[in-house]
Image (spheres, grey):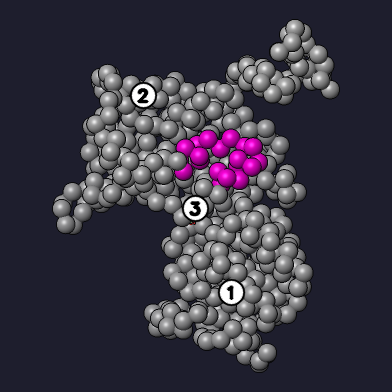
Amino acid sequence: MASANAIAQIGVTGLAVMGSNIARNFARNGYTVALHNRSVAKTDALLAAHGDEGQFVRTETIEEFLGALEKPRRVLIMVKAGEATDAVIEELAAAMEPGDIIIDGGNALYTDTIRREAAMAARGLNFVGAGISGGEEGALNGPAIMPGGPKESYESLGPLLESVAAKVDGVPCCTHIGPDGSGHFVKMVHNGIEYADMQLIGEAYHLLRDALGSSAGQIAEVFTEWNSGELESYLVEITAQVLQQVDATTGEPLVDVIVDAAEQKGTGRWTVKSALDLGIPVTGIAEAVFARALSGSRAQRKAAQGLAAGTLAEKPTDAKQFTEDIRRALYASKIVAYAQGFDQIAAGSAEYDWDLHPGDMATIWRGGCIIRARFLNRIKEAYEQDPALPSLILAPYFRQAIEEAVDSWRRVVSTAVQLGIPVPAFASSLAYYDALRAERLPAALTQGQRDFFGAHTYERVDADGKFHTLWSGDRTEVRAD
Ligand code: 6PG
């Protein structure tokens, strides 16, 4: 390799918007950045538009690209998740040397990252799956970064990533998450929470629009006001901005001319699939994923228009009170979504032996990422006080926040049901809360049924061990262990 030219501290391959922006972010922070893209036109476009922002090295081939990098080489891949990533990794790995670091900054499936990390480790290379959140703007000005992979690689990589990450109170929104696929796992759960948060905001908007008859502009004002309180967050802030936007063609609010069919690239679905495997009820996230799917079933929805609504209730008369009820329901449901996401992180950590620290996530999600929110400071504090919290909901601050919101939450869900307005995430979050705090669930009956038809046995409240009733015999009980 041409070591005389090895002047770049980091290389970025894959120069679509996210890749270009993060490359610019590194350059703006004083690093020399080697640039590579399959078609060199993208590299040249980046250099033409932003080449004066810092030190870039233009390269055309992988050999040139790797030759431009200081050792151990650090290469950030910003290509489409899936096969494209595997192809680029293979090309790089074939030409790299032991100790070099490949960082996958895309939204990769964490099991792919586990596989890739093991394959690269066997070849003496370090592979770091790093979740990067914050969209295009975050990539340029400071994202939240969730790097997994070997701890040793973080020693060489961490300072670079931390310097380009967002900062909150001077603390970088980047830390070593844990081994192998843990960075992408945590980013996946981040996206699941993002889905839940967006769905909850959508349900709040739906209620303000259809239960109170408010216009997009009026609802924008409500969200703007909410953003000055405990709901302060990036997603609430941009909701107000989207609702304020007027369509240039029709003069109508833009939100009223956008087709109401939500798309998804897959990270929310991955979160739910993984939660199913881990046995963690991420009900808010699941409802959000299904709500997007339902909205996208356009032919079915069209055919179903005009189905009976039954007798609907009158709309709420006290708009101010109902708006405040919605705000509280949103806050309580949001706490549930985060609690469920943190449960999934704990379960993933236990399953893969990652030793993840939930407080780390709360700290680095405070800035840069899509789910950044004021209340993450509270989550951080909750885990500082008790790193082994059985559920976020049980932390004193959140327990009290829900206690203050629960009456409103019930009113919102029951009003929505009576008005025929679907609120799957509000309703399932409340059901989750009620189930969690219930003294006795109907699961005892489920166990009885399972024992009846399959001799699956049950435990008793008053004795240890497993039992079975001879359902098709004399119905006496026998021990089954
Ligand atoms: C982020 C976002 C980012 C992307 C989502 C969108 O954290 O910066 O989550 O990763 O915008 O993948 O996902 P959907 O297309 O599935 O909504």
Residue under the point 69% across and 23% down: 454
Viewer-nearest residue: 459 or 169: 459
Relative image position of residue 128 (x, y in whole percent):
66, 64
Q: Which residue is mark 3?
A: 266
Looking at the figure, which quarter contains the N terminus?
Answer: bottom right
Q: Magenta residues, as a range?
A: 271-289
Q: CA distance from mark 1 to mark 2?
A: 51 Å
Q: Amino acid at mark 3?
A: Gly
Looking at the image, the residue that sits furthest to the front is 473
Viewer-nearest residue: 83 or 424: 83
Please tell me whether mark 3 sits on a helix, a strand or a loop: loop
Q: Is residue 372 above or below residue 130?
A: above
Q: Which residue is mark 2?
A: 417
Label 2 crowding class (10 Å Cα cut-off): few <14, some 14-19, many 20+?
Answer: some
Locate residue 450 relative to residue 123 in the image: left or right: left
Q: Amino acid at mark 2?
A: Val
The first of marks 2 and 3 along the sequence is: 3
